[in-house]
Amino acid sequence: METVDSKTIKPTPLEASNREKLKRLYKNKGFKTIPQLPSEQEAERIVVTYRNFPASLVPKEYMDPIELDGNSLLRGDIVALWWTTSRKNISNPPQYFLYEYGVDYYGSLSKLKSLGLLTSDDKLTESGETVVQKSKKIIWQHKAAKTIKSDGTVKYSSSRGVSGKLLVVNKAKYPKTPRKDYLESYFVKSNQRIQYLWESKQYELCEKEALEQVDLGNKFPAVYSILAMLYRKQKRYQDELDILKKGVEAQISIQNPGVAIRDFRKRIIRVEELINK
């Protein structure tokens, strides 16, 4: 058998990992701060889908540092500060910290504590309280319904003002020419209206208009989520199960890479347990 000198063999260059590809993508898009990267499997999904579904990328503006009282914070850090101190149970932080804001939640907590905005037992310091008060618009935007455009810009809509006051939202008119851009604007406004009806406890009208939206092809997760909450409140478990399954189908049909599908599937498991009790 002929032997080959190992020194003459040129190593085959390894293909970049999907996490490296995603990192390079963010750099090419001009991100000054690279978002926290997800797992290799999730990075592959994002690299494959981002052209058709820009919402799979962290919005560029979310990675721009925000200067507050001498502290340089990312939007995700501010949301983490508010989220941590506005609830009792923080053992299961939402996935949106990673996928929407590009931060590691626990890394943000360490940063906030090192800056003196959060105590060792996760309470607001005086400086932290000041930051939260100055960040009302960011917190409002976090709670609002969002539409991420192909250029990465984010459009917000909510049934409440920045102060938290519930706003009266009139019903939107279905566009005479149902072009894609007209429909998207109509659905966003309708989602805002449904959220308003839910929060103002007009449940009968809320259900009626939300079901109309489903029939018209509104596939935003908010519609299905509100209907599911309404049915759970009324202990209509089979209706809840049916609308959650429709919600999953809707997200799959538009290849929505967000956390809605995972959330809906978890809720399906729970409501099936209630049905089978």
Image (cartoon, rainbow, N blue to C red):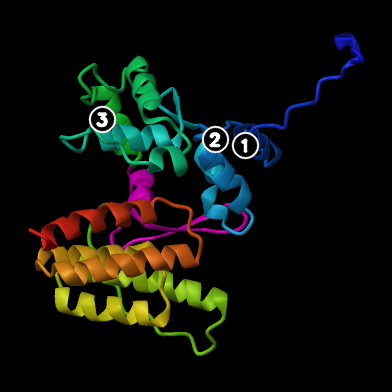
Do the CB atoms of the residues marked 1 and 2 lie less than 8 Å apart?
Answer: yes
Residue 66: x %, y % from top left: 48, 33
Task: Write down the residue under mark 3.
Answer: 129
Q: 274 or 6, which is in the foreground? A: 6
Which-is-in-front pick, marks 2 and 3? 2
Please identify the quadrant where the C terminus is shown: bottom left
Q: Is residue 98 magenta?
A: no
Mark number for residue 40? 2
Answer above or below: position of 17 versus 211.
Answer: above
Q: Amino acid at mark 1?
A: Asn
Please report whichever mark, 1 or 2, sits nearer to the chain's N-terminal start. 1
Tell me the residue at 57%/57% (across/down).
Answer: 53
Local SS, label 2: helix
Which-is-in-front pick, marks 1 and 3? 1
Q: Residue furthest front?
A: 1
Q: Residues within 10 Å of mark 3 (few under 14, many from 20)?
A: some
Mark number for residue 112? none
Q: Amino acid at mark 2?
A: Glu
Q: CA distance from mark 2 to mark 3?
A: 37 Å
Hey, which quadrant is residue 186 in on the image? bottom left
Task: Write down the residue under mark 1.
Answer: 18
Residue 268: x %, y % from top left: 25, 58
What segment carries the magenta color?
136-162
* Left or right placement of residue 260 versus residue 12 in this view: left
Residue 4: x %, y % from top left: 90, 13
Q: Is residue 150 magenta?
A: yes
